[in-house]
Image (cartoon, rainbow, N blue to C red):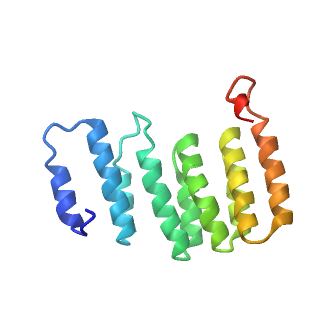
Amino acid sequence: AEAGRLDDAMAMMRLVIEPRPYTVNHTRRNLALALVKAGRLAEAAALAARIDTTNLNGYRSDSFAAIAVAHVKAGRFAEADALARAMAGESARDRVILALIPAFAEAGQFGTSLALARSAYYPNHRAEALAEFGAALTRAGREKGAGAAFGEALKAALERPEGYFRAEI
């Protein structure tokens, strides 16, 4: 796949003799990421959709995150936002959102970046997303807004139940 022979790599994947979920999912994720690099986003999305989520390894959300970021880099902001919001499962959706925060901010789409950060379902993911948004604002020279984002991130972090990684704060 890394040599650019994506069709050959996909054919090899179909020949995997004792398909084990981890091996198949790992291969599908790697091929989906290679397809993203090659700009073949529709094929990457079709392959990523076939990644089994029962073992919760994040391969599907990692693949869709790469696809969504590629949409942002190509200026297709609505597609990226829709892809993130359509992800099944709160944790998977949050993983895609976390990947999109810096991409949208770097594209100057600060409003979308902030809205996505605030939409993260789990408080720890929301805290991470808001902190990433604050870091993106800092990189853009918007320190005043960054301070507010970091404050909001801290507030989200404190929403986590006692004993649930509270020692990280």
Point out the residue furthest to the top here: 163
Front residue of 147/59: it is 147
Asked if residue 107 is positioned above or below residue 68 in the image, the reply reads below
Front residue of 153/19: it is 153
Residue in the picture at 34% in, 71% down: 38
Q: Quadrant of the N terminus?
A: bottom left
Viewed as shown, does residue 20 lie left or right of 61? Answer: left
Q: Residue 72: horizontal and vertical position, in percent?
A: 55, 70
Asked if residue 161 is positioned above or below residue 156 in the image, the reply reads above
Viewed as shown, does residue 163 lie left or right of 58? Answer: right
Q: Residue 25: horizontal and vertical position, in percent?
A: 32, 44
Point out the residue furthest to the bottom here: 75
Q: Residue 32: horizontal and vertical position, in percent?
A: 35, 58
Q: Quadrant of the C terminus?
A: top right
Asked if residue 62 is positioned above or below residue 4 in the image, the reply reads above
Viewed as shown, does residue 99 lie left or right of 165? Answer: left
Q: How many marks?
A: 0
Residue in the picture at 38% in, 51% down: 49
Displayed quadrant of residue 123: top right
